[in-house]
Amino acid sequence: DAGVIQSPRHEVTEMGQEVTLRCKPISGHNSLFWYRQTMMRGLELLIYFNNNVPIDDSGMPEDRFSAKMPNASFSTLKIQPSEPRDSAVYFCASNSGGRSNEQFFGPGTRLTVL
Amino acid sequence: QQQVKQSPQSLIVQKGGISIINCAYENTAFDYFPWYQQFPGKGPALLIAIRPDVSEKKEGRFTISFNKSAKQFSLHIMDSQPGDSATYFCAARNRGTYKYIFGTGTRLKVLA
């Protein structure tokens, strides 16, 4: 099992550019979560999907952020336009649902917006 | 009410000592309390978890103590080792959802 896969691992971009982060959850997992981690705010849940449907997006900071899950094996988090304050590590996690409680995290994408 | 307050922010312990990290919450709808361990450059990984109907859970050197009436829970690491040096996050899950609220993290350093 390859675990949760995220790409790219590092992204450096300039303010105003569009950024797309990608995630492949563990096969068979039907819940997917996007988190943002910063020193100031810790680990924040941005959005989560269950069976490819967005369930709670209350953590999405503003309209510049959007997330999609077109199928069970792929999700994207897009920031357009990006700003320096978006610089953070973005994690994707998945969970098998049902009675399972554990969220399995990917290695993260470190985003730097100049 | 959705917050989980974690302390201390950082902790330095001698090898062989006991590391203790505390968390407190307000929301009585939380029904699952995991602890995650994160090494630099890696994603968090589940360490140990507890449900509120149990006061203590032990797995090897790691123990969660849970005080439902005080709405507090803590992680104890016995015989701390340099390999335990990492950031530890407590979390709480809203009943009926898969949504976790994470604490702010504790950076633990165990001196050799």
Image: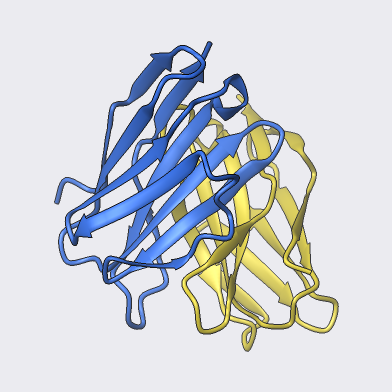
* Above or below: residue A46 compared with residue B14: below
Front residue (pair A74, B42) = A74
Q: Is residue B79 visible?
A: no
Quadrant position of the N terminus of chain B in the picture: bottom right
Palette colour of chain A: blue
- Residue drawn at x 51%, y 84% is B96
Residue B23: % across, % down: 75, 60
- The image quadrant of residue A2 is top left
**Observer-nearest of A37 and B35:** A37
Does residue B35 appear anywhere in the picture? Answer: yes
Q: How is the image coloured?
A: by chain
Q: Position of residue A57 (x, y in %)?
A: 51, 60
A99 horizontally vs B31: left or right? left
Residue A107 horizontal side relative to residue B79, left or right: left
Residue that appears at 37% across and 19% down:
A11
Q: Residue B101's spot in the image, x, y percent?
A: 62, 61
Whether B2 is drawn above or below A106: the answer is below
Q: Nearer the viewer, residue B99 or B72?
A: B99
**Residue occupying image coordinates x 15% and y 59%:** A27
Q: Colour of chain B?
A: yellow
Does residue B3 appear left or right of residue A43 in this picture? right
Residue closest to the far bottom: B53
Position of A97 relative to B81 (above/below): below
Compared to residue B39, the image places residue A94 above or below, namely: below
Quadrant position of the C terminus of chain B in the picture: top right
